[in-house]
Amino acid sequence: MRIDRLLLPILLSMLLATPARALVVEGRVVRVSDGDTVAVAGKGGIEKIRLLGIDCPEKAQAPWGPRAKAFTQGKVAGKTVRVETDVQERDKYGRLLGYVFVGKELVNEALVREGLAMLYTAPPNVRYSDRFLAAQRVARQAGKGIWNSRDGLKQSPYEFRHGGRAAPASVGQPALGGGVAHAPERTGGGYATASETPVETPFVANTRTGKLHEANCRWARKIAQGSRKGFSSAEAGKAEGFKPCGTCLRR
Ligand SMILES: [Zn+2]
């Protein structure tokens, strides 16, 4: 057919112009190491997967580490999942960096929504960071899980792993030992906000006024981009000399 002959080159060129699609691995979850690390038995054998864009509390950060693990187990253990990669396929340990789906549910997002993981944006892997950010905002405002004001997480998983040192700049919620993040440019503790990356930290300081706020405080929202400095805990901000806001951090 004549039409086909004309269309074929066009279709081919369209196909070639499409950016490389994410690698997709399908298989059964044979192990859940912790909230954000699972092993999947696919066609190519067993793949260890690090869930992208999020960071779960460590085992020793009880009860949250164990709870995050139990949640992931409940969602995926023994089930068939689809794992989608982003720009960077693997970390330096050879683990596949992925978004894990059970049916239509994105498990990475579910963990954040339940307050069992923190946003952990590591460019260039940002496909779902808007969704994770929105989920984290909801969880934090509802005081769910690690955001619980009574017995929530006192240190971000990153800080915990690094003996209290805050996350490097330019990464939403820090560089993993896993090497997911790109070269950090430290600005001295706290999560500095990378301009093109949506980053949500629970506390924000105004470097101009020296005041520390909860991120959802009305004053926090007015801080100019160049004067914002994020922190994972109020303690971390105070340790750098920022004074608690009288509105949102009054005791
Ligand atoms: Zn405030």
Image (cartoon, rainbow, N blue to C red):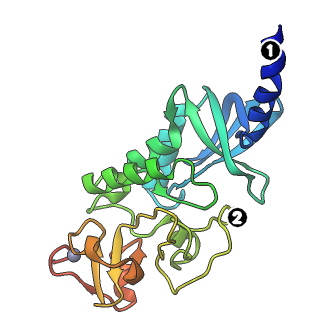
Any part of residue 40 in sight: yes
Three-letter amino acid code at the position of disc 2: Gly
Image quadrant in which you'd find residue 125: bottom right
Give how far across and how far down residue 108 sits, in percent. Answer: 52, 44
Any part of residue 67 in sight: no
Image quadrant in which you'd find residue 240: bottom left
- Cβ of mark 1 under 8 Å from ligand 1: the answer is no
Label located before the other in sequence (2 or 1): 1
Write the residue at 73% across / 38% down.
23
* Residue where numbered disc 2 is placed: 179
* Residue where numbered disc 1 is placed: 4
Looking at the rendered structure, the number of numbered marks drawn on it comes to 2
Indicate the secondary structure of the residue bearing disc 2.
Answer: loop
Q: In which quarter of the image is ligand 1?
A: bottom left
- Judging depth in this view, the residue of 208 and 69 nearest the camera is 208
- 67 in relation to 105, above or below: below
Indicate the secondary structure of the residue bearing disc 1.
Answer: helix
- 131 in relation to 175, above or below: above
Three-letter amino acid code at the position of disc 1: Asp
Image quadrant in which you'd find residue 78: top right
| Label 2 close to label 1 by CB (< 8 Å) | no
Give how far across and how far down residue 212 sits, in percent. Answer: 29, 81
